[in-house]
Image (cartoon, rainbow, N blue to C red):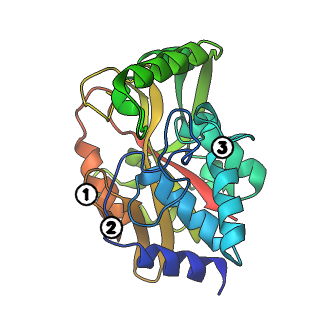
Amino acid sequence: MDLQARLTTIAEFFLDKPYQFEPLGEGIQGIYSNLPLYRADQFDCVTYIDTLLALAHAADFNQFKKNILQIRYVSHPIDYTKRTDWFTDLEWNPRLQQLGYIQDATLTILDENKKPVAMQASTLINKPEFYAQKILANLDLQNLSVETAKERLAQLQAEGKKFTTQPSVLSYIPLTTLFDSQGQPNAAIWMQFPLVSVIEVVRPHWRPVNPKDKQTDYGTHLNVTHLGLAIRTSTGILFYHASTGKSVIKLLLTDYLHPFLEDVRPAPIRGIHIEKII
């Protein structure tokens, strides 16, 4: 199979698998999480894409294991604070570009004058505060007393202080470019999409809450709120993603994005960033 066929086959195989925020960890030897290094029974949006890419570029199971660890960690050895999952634009994109899995295609989308239509989202990623805001619910540790778990949490928060706040700038195609004033898809734009790509939903400078308790602060602003797999077909661009709180689903990317034209939340969704899968 070619890349498009492989990704389609794998994406279809995982349809209806349940959503679970942060289903992966550092294995039984992990200091802060004993969740498995890889799994196929549940996903969040990032680990779903991680698994698809690792499988699509593997000839056997050993290669898959090597791939998924390279994708999920910025360097070796494996460590909770080296995960690429946390900050898509700051760490996940550069890591996968370095490994040769993806290539930024956002600036290749042009208007009728052959000029890029992309805009830029910017924010500050506050890593020290991100770790400072961690709570016990963020640690998935097995067979430890509450006191030991609290010690591990304090250790993680202390580790977080070694990081710095970093600026993040991400290009994106505005929703108002993807759709015309009547809310119809702008065909001249959509036809430029790669055959297979990772679509990152851009919500510039938004401040989430901790998904573990849905109350405490996340500790930093972000630019990316979600991501999924886009595959061009004769009937449109299909979007496969682990839908938050639900399961792995597919639908037309136009149908997924159209409702966000009416997004009135603080720091609303503004558009998408496109990474071509190579």
The picture places residue 208, in percent across and down from the top left corner, at 35, 28
Could you give the CA–CA distance between mark 2 and mark 1, rounded to whole angstroms? 9 Å
Tell me the tag on residue 246: 1
Q: CA distance from mark 2 to mark 3?
A: 26 Å
Which mark is on residue 73? Answer: 3
The answer to which quarter of the image holds residue 211 is top left
Earlier along the polypeptide chain: callout 3 or callout 1? 3
Q: Quadrant of the C terminus?
A: bottom right
Q: Looking at the rendered structure, which numbered label has been put on residue 4?
A: none
Asked if marks 2 and 1 touch (Cβ < 8 Å), the reply is yes
Q: From the viewer's side, name the closer residue of 220 and 183.
A: 220
Amino acid type assigned to the residue bearing label 3 in the image? Tyr
Which callout, 2 or 1, points to the residue nearer the camera?
1
Can you see residue 229?
A: yes
Q: Secondary structure at mark 1?
A: loop
Q: Residues within 10 Å of mark 1 (few under 14, many from 20)?
A: few
| Mark 3–mark 1 distance (CA, rounded to whole Å) | 26 Å
Q: Which residue is mark 2?
A: 249
Evaluate whether residue 194 shows in this view: no
Q: Residue furthest bottom?
A: 1
